[in-house]
Amino acid sequence: MDNTIKALLIVVVLFLIIGFLTNTTNNTQVKYPSILTSQNGTNNNSGLISPHEAIAIANQNIPAFGQVRYGVVLISNGQNPYYMVTLYGNDASLNSYGQIIVVSKVDAKTGQFLGSTV
């Protein structure tokens, strides 16, 4: 195999590893029913609820059962930041494995559930 192809493969593998490691820090894997609960309030200097609290609020409104994984992204759109909480199937024995089940929005300041899409 040519050295440039080997180098290219190594770079691609490194990017995949970095992407996987970055993705796992933004996802929470849980098995429901679970003891995830909201702590009601802010716990950081920015005045926003935590991503863990956003997951708990989304789960209170759209309960998840079985093995699932949550992805949480803070959307900063001026004065109304919100968390997009994405629920993924995480049971490899089901057809929904790795697929998005529901996406919820939670107000990052107040913790109010803003709705969801399936």
Image (cartoon, helix red, strand yellow):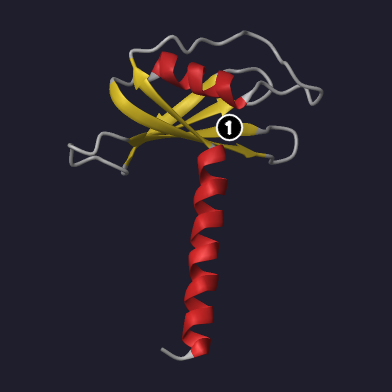
Q: Give residue 101's quadrant in the image.
A: top left
Residue 9 seen from this side:
yes
Kindly tell me whether residue 118 is visible in this rendering.
no
Depth check: give the residue in front, 105 or 17: 17
Q: Quadrant of residue 86?
A: top left
Residue closest to the eye, 32 or 116: 32
The quadrant of the picture occupied by the C terminus is top left
Residue underneath mark 1: 83
Looking at the picture, how far across and down is residue 43, in whole percent? 73, 16
Q: Report x, y in % for residue 56.
A: 49, 17
Which quarter of the figure is the N terminus placed in?
A: bottom left
Q: Residues within 10 Å of mark 1 (few under 14, many from 20)?
A: many
Q: Is residue 69 left or right of residue 91?
A: right
Q: Amino acid at mark 1?
A: Tyr
State the image coordinates of residue 84 (x, y, percent, origin top left).
Answer: 53, 35
Vertical relation: 72 (above or below) 21: above
Left or right of 64, for residue 39: right
Q: Is residue 113 above or below residue 87?
A: above
Q: Is residue 23 left or right of residue 102?
A: right
Looking at the image, residue 24 lies above or below residue 55: below
- What is the tally of numbered marks visible in this picture? 1
Q: Nearer the viewer, residue 67 or 109?
A: 67
**Residue 114 horizontal/vertical position (percent):** 51, 25
The furthest residue to the right: 45
Mark 1 lies on a secondary structure that is strand
Which of 20 and 38 lies nearest the eye of the viewer?
Answer: 20
